[in-house]
Image (spheres, rainbow, N blue to C red):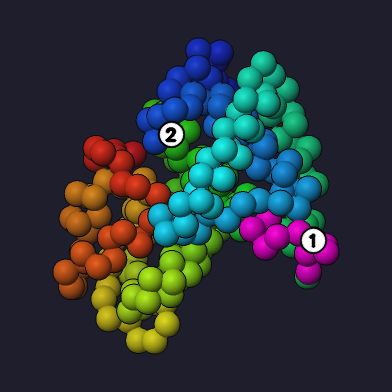
Amino acid sequence: MLLMTCDEDAFERIVPLNPAWRVRDVIAHEVGVSEEALAGYIPGAEDPKRRPDEARLRDEWTEAQVVRRHDVSVQMMLEEWEVFATSLTPLLNAPALPAGFVPHVRTAPPLDVGCHLHDLRHALGQPGDRDAPTTRVAFAIARGWLKLRLGAAQLPALRLRAHDREWVMGHGPAEATLEADEFELFRALTGRRSRHQVLAMEWDVDPEIYLETLSPYPFPDNDVAE
């Protein structure tokens, strides 16, 4: 609904949280993710800071999605996206993946949708959907990826707390707690908050050892206001 109400000029806006892309480029990327998930392959993205070759492969993969649809109208891309998303739903809910399908086809598409939804809302100046199922699912996947990164970095478990809810990420008892609004935690875990903003959240320890692991992506240079 958000994109269906936009005019053509809006599709040409730069997305500040994806500065190399316009709104239409983010749409092309999302269509490509759904299309390639149905084909069974999505490169890993849980820990690109520790795996530069994997990060480079994913960057090339996402850029190719944008290039392939450079001359496709936004309306046509939205129609494609709806078809792919409808076909993808049974795959995401299936008890087991088909042979040869990588596990990322279950996690990457919902996380991408939830994350880029708010990137687009930010670019268009239309905040919303913070409690939507799409956002909650994406946040759950982001927490799961954080758990993997903490384990790979051999860091102590981290407790995330939002009001009356909390989640312990990692192995063993939590040795630190990060508390913030649930939406702020989600955006911090997906690289949409600056280092300054993350440090300003409520930590009960010096957070330095967790900063490079908290998000798989670099911090934005400037504070983000959504």
The first of marks 1 and 2 along the sequence is 2
52 or 4: nearer the viewer? 52
In the rendered structure, which segment of residues is drawn in magenta?
Answer: 96-105
**Residue under numbered circle 2:** 18
- Residue at 67 percent across and 37 percent down: it is 32
- Image quarter of the C terminus: top left
Residue 162 in the figure: left or right of residue 35: left
Tell me how far mark 1 sits from mark 2, CA to CA.
Answer: 31 Å
Q: Which mark is residue 100?
A: 1
15 or 71: nearer the viewer? 71
Q: Is residue 5 above or below residue 200?
A: above
Residue 135 seen in the current view: no
**Secondary structure of the residue carrying numbered label 1:** loop
Q: How many marks?
A: 2
Where is residue 119 drawn, in percent x and y?
45, 37
Marks 2 and 1: in contact by CB < 8 Å?
no
75 or 213: nearer the viewer? 213
Mark 2 Cα within 10 Å, few/some/many (few <14, many 20+)? Answer: some
- Image quarter of the N terminus: top right
